[in-house]
Amino acid sequence: MTHAVVKEAWEKVQAELERTIGEQNFHLYLKNTLIVQLNPDIAEIGVPNLTIADFVEDRFANDIMASIERVQGYRPATLKFSINGHLFRRLRERERANRDERPVDPAPEAPRTTPRREPIPRRRLNAQVFNLNPRYRLDNFVVGPSNKLAFNCAVEVATRPGRTYNPMFIYGGCGLGKTHLLQGIANALLQRHENLHTLYVSAEYFVNQYVQALTSNAIEQFRARFRNLDVLIVDDIHFLRGKEKSQEELLHTLAALETQGKQIVLASDLHPKELEEFKQSLQSRFVQGMVAQLNTPQFDTRLALIKSKLGPHRERFPDGVVSFLAEKLDCNIRELEGYLTQLSALAAMTGDKLSLPLVQQALTDFLAHRRRLVELSDIENVVIAHFGVTSEQLHGRVRKRNIAIARQVCMYLARQLTQHSLKEIGRFFGGKNHTTVVFAEQKITSAIEEDPELKATVNRLSRQLNAPETA
Ligand code: ADP
Ligand code: MG
């Protein structure tokens, strides 16, 4: 095909897309694109920048493929987005024009300094630092009634470890800031109390290390590592469900640390007493110090969160838009961040401030796609914790009954709570083909009818994922 023919075909596809995704979506996201290649092997679409490429791919890949199929009679094997210099420059010029229309900021420009990196103390350039996300700090944690208690305790622990709240146990649903707080404590300690030996790990890591130590006859080294610490922080404690030996080991680890007055910080998605298949002695230990809950934030906190999360994009979001968002986005914070990212991409695309009607429309659209925001890996995590299987087993081919059921529940939840295709779900859960996923979904759907216990389990897992109940 000559390029003229390709262009003509693309125009037809665009017209089709405008019909299927709606005029407004089309103008915002797909009008400023061009076709690079179009044939049964590949459809390559030029877009202005990477943000837009990711965004359009994420939201409209299926619609694009379907429109091509309707117009051309085939579905290209690959869909690719490439950055087009011309579109890039055009967008930048439009942004610049918009910026010039704004009043000039009278404040003198701040002197330019090269951003200084926080020096990492030499001694800390080891295993303790690598697993911490430097973005998770106490000073950028937004505080409100939903998390105040947990935050204040975290600050206290980071200032005077081992003194007041020991152990400190934080619990709350998915995406409400547990990991942020825990790593915030660790980051603060590593900066302020450089001489203290601080270790942050996930419960899964603890278990894996323990099992590895057992099989390689290195239990002494394992214990030396986890018991000679000043601060031990263990995330996602719910992962230990049903893992008796690991629970036992953790219990002894905590006891050893506590008798030396060392600080322990733990987090889980449920209150210690609600953790099922946990040793009672471990549960009692969890509640001996301070237990603090993280809740879903209310309006004022959401407002503060949004302002803080927008960072440099803030200028594209008028106050009216920000309060509209704070009112509507009554979800967990991870989800809120997801919407803000999408809206920032939208703002980058239009090259202008976002108007309220535009945001209202976009949000209706996002909320319709809401299910997508549960990640397959989140599903995997809760299922692993619940069924007491390992990630390897889940992704493997073993057909043992409890593993097979765990795998099917994963696929079922993925079908109910995400918009991933059968193919993607199959690929994620161990390279199964799509018929396996269809089968799993049917199997669990009918099993739920007959088995109230399974039904309760599936609903509980949905709640843990902060999603509506499915069964
Ligand atoms: P959890 O571990 O409870 O599932 P995370 O700590 O991973 O949740 O938080 C999800 C996202 O929300 C992270 O990007 C985190 O930075 C952000 N977040 C959660 N609570 C706050 C808060 N109070 N202030 C700022 N960011 C927050
Ligand atoms: Mg977490």
Image: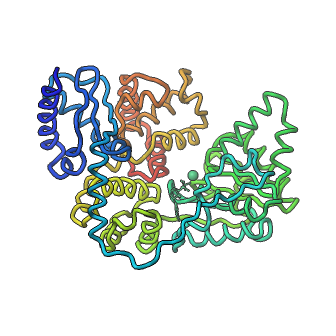
| Residue 65 to residue 318: above or below | above
Q: Is residue 138 left or right of residue 40?
A: right
| Residue 379 to residue 336: above or below | above
* Color style of the picture: rainbow
Q: Is residue 471 visible?
A: no
Residue 466 place in picture, x, y as percent? 45, 53
Q: Residue at x 88, y 38 (%)?
A: 220
* Count of numbered tags: 0
Residue 91 place in picture, x, y as percent? 28, 51
Q: Nearer the viewer, residue 379 or 242?
A: 379
Q: Residue at x 47, y 72 (%)?
A: 109
Q: Nearer the viewer, residue 90 or 453?
A: 90
Q: Is residue 134 left or right of residue 257?
A: left
Q: Nearer the viewer, residue 431 or 324?
A: 324
Residue 265 place in picture, x, y as percent? 71, 59
| Residue 14 to residue 465: above or below | above
Q: Nearer the viewer, residue 135 or 383?
A: 135
